[in-house]
Amino acid sequence: MLTPALRATKPRSDDLLAWYDRHRRDLPWRARPGETADPYRVWLSEIMLQQTTVGAVKPFYERFLERFPTVESLAEAPADAVMQAWAGLGYYSRARNLHACAKAVVENHDGRFPGTEAELLKLPGIGAYTAAAVAAIAFDRKAAAVDGNVERVVSRLFMVEEPLPKAKPIIRALTEEIVPEDRPGDFAQAVMDLGATICTPKRPACAICPWMQPCQARAAGLQETFPKKQKKETGQLRKGAAFVVLRADDSILLRTRPPQGLLGGMVEMPTSAWEPDYEPARAMVDAPIEARWKRLPGVVRHVFTHFPLELTVFLAKVPKDEPAPEDMRWTPRHQLHEEALPGAMKKVLVHALGDMPAPKAAPKAKKANA
Ligand code: SF4
């Protein structure tokens, strides 16, 4: 893949690894120098980091690991518990795949993650990037793990003119060319760290970059123009109605979404279908129960990966003996935080009730007599 001219300016892994040894990020899932990486932790972190920032993942990762410290404990957990622990991280298909993957590792691999990209790729929810990242980081295999940070660094190093996403195979092939035989796991993490801390999207710190010399974009003064990107097409706006029912005993009406599809297995207040031409004026035909509904002013906006959504919120108060319709249930407000509510539904609750109800405070322990 590298032409002779490119080969002459090929970035040296030694330069990057020397920088990494001094400046590596201290991350909770990362093995320290001299420690052996734990494949479960590496895999868990890589799944969590898909489409989510390191800062956002850190507290979730710690809590998740406390709750499911081993792949066996995760495999044995009920699906509800996994979804609940995942709530707030978004992209919920990841949680379902995570659970399925843990079960496959326990059932088919005796609780041990396989160490090759090819075997890892056969597991649920593990795509090309994650297979390469786990093989490299957890098993020190020579693998090209190309995430967004690596795409940025490599496209700048070699001035890849092809726009993303078409450039992906080119960038992957170039990355394969620079992965060393020695310390491929550290190399993978080093390129990620370089992209996260030095070769940032805006104003990369080229002056302190260990690859300043061979970087073609830096030489041309065009760093920030790479990677080239194709214009994004945003999905069509969908609209719908969300129904918040508050019972006199301070409970909210909820239901669980079907396991497959958008937000599969997550919990929500009843809603209408979400459609581009939904008319809130005819929302009453979708209301889950007969009640005196109040249409709240404004709308709740939420952006999913493929489309933006606008929900008109309706609120009703019902007596405490109101039964839940089929496939729905009442949940006390102070227990809502235990439900796997996605971000869009939390916004609906805040819109309807003024805030996301906090858990009930535990009763204070009595002071011992002096
Ligand atoms: S020299 Fe600048 S643009 Fe090139 S890899 Fe380093 S930080 Fe990125």
Image: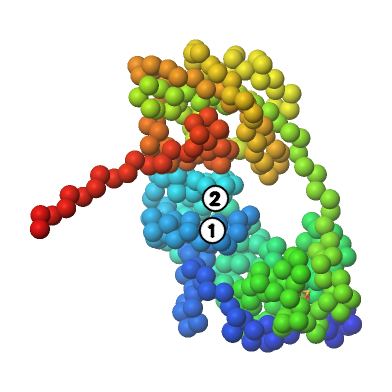
Type of amino acid under label 1: Val
Residue 32 location (% of width, % of height): 49, 78
Give the structural element (helix, strand or loop) at label 2: loop
**Is 300 placed left or right of 291 in the picture?**
right
Please give the label number shown on residue 57: 1
Q: Residue at x 88, y 65 (%)?
A: 161
Q: Residue at x 52, y 66 (%)?
A: 42
Asked if the residue at tag 1 contacts the one at tag 2, i.e. Cβ–Cβ closer than 8 Å, the answer is yes
Q: Nearer the viewer, residue 158 or 77?
A: 158
Q: Quadrant of the C terminus?
A: bottom left
Give the structural element (helix, strand or loop) at label 1: helix
Q: Residue at x 35, y 19 (%)?
A: 320
Residue count near mark 1 (Cα–Cα under 10 Å), binned few <14, some 14–19, many ≥20: some
Residue 268 location (% of width, % of height): 51, 32
Type of amino acid under label 2: Leu
Q: Residue at x 45, y 49 (%)?
A: 85
